[in-house]
Image: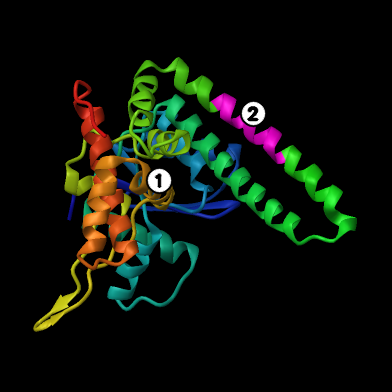
């Protein structure tokens, strides 16, 4: 067991269930509840808040913890559920989940991640909204293709509105990047690579701040483009990618498709894989991996010129 003082918190929309070796209990997930909880946490010696990603509900808690210099660990809920299944635990409630989180934290002994800068955190929120608007715009354009005459004006009006909102979000993103010298330089270098556009560059800046701190293998595994072996005895299964940061992976896939046509280095690489009989999607994953490593090298060693 570790001696770290983990504070495990199961997050719901309106409540926080806490379990730790120091104190436990339920708190309302509002200003008063957070103030009470954080007061108790700050009285613990070197506390580490441990919680699952919950689709955005965790943001307020993490923001308040970071503002008070409280270390935090955010874990993928799939890992915790797999941990529960390995113990044969089938029951589920907020107190049970909080206790499970504490055991998981203590056994895995995970290190807290440094908090993102306010600029990068704002960029993350804006990129989330950028993705939402882009998806909504695509849906409306698809509807326009087969809509009846009576709804055409409504859909066209919605498309214009979404495009206006998207342009506004883009301006805010450009302003944040322009005001941060480090992010500005990284953005310019990434966009200098043929196939990498604004959206891919902004996505990496927002969601992959540790790109220059990791090794190549760590980086591709974190993003979810490292093929894992599926072998057992004499059986040799197909290697597959899984997990990782889907937001980055989606953008990298589109960038790799563009680079496979317009970037001479990536095109030659992909053509060679296809000529050897590799399936198209396998070749694209390999191109994504090569492109990401190119970008990492470019940011780590600014004097180099790649692709």
Where does the magenta region start and end? 162-172
Q: Considering depth in this image, is 297 or 306 the residue closer to the camera?
A: 306
Checking the image for residue 23, the label placed there is: none
Q: Is residue 259 left or right of residue 55?
A: left
Which residue of the protein is positioned furthest toward the right in this rendering?
Answer: 150
Image x and y of residue 218, in percent = 20, 47
Q: Visible in this render: residue 139?
A: yes
> Residue at position x 49%, y 22% from top?
176
The answer to whether residue 112 is visible is no
Would residue 168 be counted in the magenta stretch?
A: yes
- Give left or right: position of 150 versus 55: right
Q: Nearer the viewer, mark 1 or mark 2?
A: 1
**Quarter residue 216 falls in:** top left
Rendered image quadrant of residue 48: top left
Q: 10 Å neighbourhood of mark 1: few (<14), some, or many (≥20)?
A: some
302 over 264 or under it: above or below: above
State the scheme by which the image is colored: rainbow
Is 226 situated above or below 182?
Answer: below
* Residue at horizontal 24 percent and vertical 48 percent from the top: 268
Q: Position of residue 161 (x, y in %)?
A: 75, 38
Real-space Cα separation, disc 1 to disc 2, in angstroms: 26 Å
Q: Residue 258, labelled with which disc? A: 1
Secondary structure of the magenta portion, mostly? Answer: helix
Q: Residue at x 75, y 39 (%)?
A: 160
Helix, strand or loop under label 2: helix
Q: Secondary structure at mark 1?
A: helix
Give the residue at mark 2.
Answer: 168
**Where residue 263 appears, x then y in whole percent?**
32, 40
């Amino acid at each position: 067991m570790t001696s770290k003082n983990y504070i495990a918190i199961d997050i719901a929309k309106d409540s926080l269930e806490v379990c730790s070796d120091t104190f436990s209990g339920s708190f309302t997930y509002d200003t008063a509840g957070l103030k009470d909880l954080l007061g108790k946490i700050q009285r613990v010696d070197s506390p580490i808040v441990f919680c699952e990603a919950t689709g955005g509900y965790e943001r307020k808690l993490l923001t308040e913890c970071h503002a008070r210099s409280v270390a935090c660990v955010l874990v993928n809920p799939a890992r915790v559920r797999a941990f529960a299944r390995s113990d044969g635990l089938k029951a589920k409630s907020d107190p049970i989940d909080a206790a499970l989180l504490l055991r998981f934290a203590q056994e895995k002994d995970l290190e807290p991640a440094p908090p993102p800068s306010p600029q990068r955190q704002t960029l993350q929120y804006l990129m989330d909204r950028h993705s939402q608007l882009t998806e909504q715009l695509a849906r409306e354009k698809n509807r326009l293709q087969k809509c009846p005459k009576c709804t055409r004006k409504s859909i066209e009006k919605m498309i214009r509105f979404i495009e206006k909102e998207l342009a506004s979000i883009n301006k805010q993103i450009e302003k944040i990047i322009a005001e941060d010298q480090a992010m500005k330089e990284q953005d310019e270098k990434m966009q200098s690579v043929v196939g990498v556009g604004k959206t891919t560059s902004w996505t990496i800046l927002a969601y992959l701040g540790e790109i220059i701190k990791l090794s190549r293998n760590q980086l591709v595994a974190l993003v979810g483009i490292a093929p894992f072996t599926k072998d057992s005895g004499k059986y040799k299964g197909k290697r597959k990618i899984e997990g990782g940061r889907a937001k980055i992976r989606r953008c990298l896939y589109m960038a790799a498709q563009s680079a496979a046509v317009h970037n001479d280095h990536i095109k030659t690489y992909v053509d060679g894989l296809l000529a050897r009989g590799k399936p198209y999607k396998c070749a694209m994953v390999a191109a994504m991996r090569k492109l990401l490593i190119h970008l990492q090298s470019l940011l780590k060693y600014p004097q180099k010129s790649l692709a």
